Image: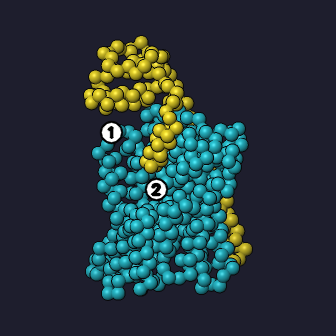
Chain colours: A cyan, B yellow
Amino acid sequence: MLIMIAIACVLLYLAIVKKFEPLLLLPIAFGMLIANLPLGGVMHKEYFTAEGINFAEMIAHGGLIDWLYLGVKLGIYPPLIFLGVGAMTDFGPLIANPKSILLGAAAQLGIFIAFIGAMLLGGFFPEQFAQFDINGAASIGIIGGADGPTAIYLTKTLKPELLSMIAIAAYSYMALIPIIQPPIMKLLTTKKERVIVMEQLRPVSKTEKIIFPIVVTLIVALIIPDAVPLVGMLMLGNLMKESGVVSRISNTAQNELMNIITIFLGISVGATADAKTFLTPATLGIVVLGLCAFCLSTAGGVLFGKIMCKLSGGKINPLIGSAGVSAVPMAARVSQVVGQKENLANFLLMHAMGPNVAGVIGSAVAAGVFLSMLAN
Amino acid sequence: MSSEQLMEMLIICVQGIMTVFAVLIILWIAIIIMHKCATLGQGKEKKQEKPAAAPAPAVAPKAAPTAVEEDDDELIAVLTAAVAASLNTSTYNLRIKSFRRIGQNAPAWNAVSRKEQLENQL
């Protein structure tokens, strides 16, 4: 318990002093702190069993955090966060350069490779050390998508025991993007490729921006119905923003609603981290495999970027491939910064936003695939 | 790990990767079709709009006259806003009649400073 409090304090330090994704890491760390106080008992995990939720006990003895956790358990918070993300996202760069959608798909490779890795790891180590079943492996793999809400949405269904570890790993790595990605990007590209200046994007009409979310929702709903709660809400948020007729709702989704859900999500996810589940070798496995998933996703995006660069006759800068991991807009900023280090007059940000927003759709689809195959 | 599990894992993986690519490729095609449809409609609109350009009082023409292309709408909006802000007036009182691009002739130190300012915003 003391160790857990110490870990919570370290995470608080990282959030406050180092500013690692403070918006989520801070409530998560604080939730962790209050859940592990010696006489606390603010979180009753025993109410949330694999068989179902014990509502009778919750009404009789449950507290605030138990009720807030319902939003995670029932899969309410992640889609609502996606609603806010959609209302803040501009899909314009993706519509202007639809080729970049492929980079968003390639950057999901890490998810599946880490999934295999997590399964194989069980074969090499004794059972008590980092043994993940197929559901656990999928939950670890999704860290490679660099998408916190998607990771939480998938894990709460497939492997709720790992929820806190996976959420913390996902958000920590998202915060570390500016440190993790540049070495991989530099390693996989040549100087000549990094200095490529891309053509300016065409202007995108309002009509296209309005039709886009509707078309995406229809296509995703037809192919992967399990991804609809995430993608559907993302697109609803975007439609509200682009249509321009509901600016009040769109503003609420972007600001107040998003902030409220972030607080609820952070604190209740943090509160699930108790010593019994957190201080196990499995956590170490998740941290290592999560990092691998992340690196492989970046590498997948950059390598695919190189292929597209070759095919397009040197018109595409492979650095934008790394932005295919969906952390918006951090991954795109990294592409911009790395590109500008080589060529001062090179502005890759808008080009990188294309794969970046495609990555959000890609990782939600990947989560939908796992859900459709493993949830039952 | 049994071979059965291994097979299941590989099937999930291959199917997963293929689905992600398939969905996004379909979206790619959908975007292209959408763009085609949108430009078809726009092409007609533009032809109709051309004769309807009305003159208005000019306040701040930037430099020697050059032909204003239709694609420059956004740039003109930015120019209007910038001039309005510096003159402390409303954009309704202004009309940009023409503008001319000038080459990069700022001293190197200014350019570096501007770049740093931009980077700090990122």
Write the residue at 43% across / 26% down. Answer: B73
Of mark 2 and mark 1, the one earlier in the sequence is: 2
State the image quarter where residue A110 is shown: bottom right
Question: Closer to the camera, B8 or A154?
Answer: A154
Amino acid type indicated by mark 2? Leu
According to the image, label 2 marks what residue?
A: A230
> Would you call the spot at circle 2 few (<14 residues within 10 Å), some (14-19), or many (20 or more)?
many
Q: Position of residue B60 (x, y in %)?
A: 34, 21
Q: Position of residue A272 (x, y in %)?
A: 41, 76
State the image quarter where residue A298 is shown: bottom right
> Relative to residue A52, is residue A42 drawn left or right?
left
State the image quarter where residue A64 is shown: bottom left
Question: Closer to the camera, A1 or A14?
Answer: A14
> Relative to residue B115, is residue A296 drawn left or right?
right
- Looking at the figure, which quarter contains the N terminus of chain B? bottom right
Question: Closer to the camera, B58 or A154?
Answer: B58
Vertical arrangement, residue A43 with respect to residue A196, above or below: below
Label drawn at residue B94: none
> Relative to residue A16, is residue A59 drawn left or right?
left
Vertical arrangement, residue A67 with respect to residue A2, above or below: above
Residue at disc 1, secondary structure:
loop
Could you tell me how far apart the alpha carbons at marks 2 and 1 are, in whole angstroms? 23 Å
Q: Position of residue A357 (x, y in %)?
A: 51, 49
Write the residue at 46% across / 25% down. Answer: B72
Label drawn at residue A245: 1
> Would you call the spot at circle 1 few (<14 residues within 10 Å), some (14-19), or many (20 or more)?
few
Write the residue at 44% across / 45% down. Answer: B117
